[in-house]
Amino acid sequence: MTKNVLFITGLLFLNTLTFSHADVLSIAEKNNISNSESGVLRPVNGLSMQQVEQRFGAAENQYPAVGEPPITVWVYSDFKVYFEHQSVIHSVVIK
């Protein structure tokens, strides 16, 4: 009986070893994402106005804040960026 218990315990231990591994997922830096077939890079949510301007340059058009919370729109040649206060909440590719 003791041999059977030790054998079963050993098998259970070995079984847990075979399943105790981890996969590694490498994710590129999330500063920009491509959301179109042409691969247009645009700002991701959460970036500040200052970060967007540093990475993408000055916008072609900047519309003043409207509403509450204040929503500001910056227009670039390939995309528009929508800000709530000072943070990106959405960006879309212009076709």
Image (spheres, rainbow, N blue to C red):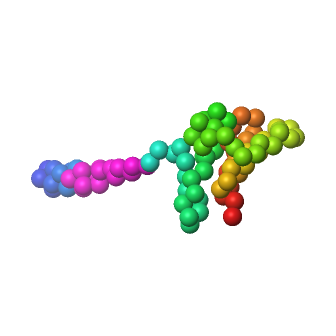
Residue 64 percent across, percent down from the top left:
83, 39
- Residue at 63% x, 44% y is 45
- Residue at 59% x, 36% y is 54
Magenta segment boundaries in residue numbering? 14-27
Foreground of the two, 22 or 88:
88
Q: In this view, which residue lies farthest toward the left?
A: 3
Position of 93 with respect to 7 (left or right) is right
- Residue at 87% x, 40% y is 67
Residue 85 percent across, percent down from the top left:
76, 35
Foreground of the two, 49 or 88:
49
Q: Is residue 81 above or below residue 53?
A: below
Q: Is residue 1 visible?
A: no
Please state the total of marks drawn on the protein image: 0
Position of 14 with respect to 86 (left or right) is left
Position of 43 with respect to 94 (left or right) is left
Position of 5 with respect to 26 (left or right) is left
Which quadrant would the C terminus be assigned to in this image? bottom right
Residue 92 shown in magenta = no
Q: Quadrant of residue 19?
A: bottom left
- Residue at 58% x, 57% y is 40
Residue 77 percent across, percent down from the top left:
67, 54
Q: Quadrant of residue 94?
A: bottom right
Residue 3 percent across, percent down from the top left:
12, 53
Foreground of the two, 71 or 80:
80
Q: Is residue 25 visible?
A: yes
Foreground of the two, 61 or 2:
61
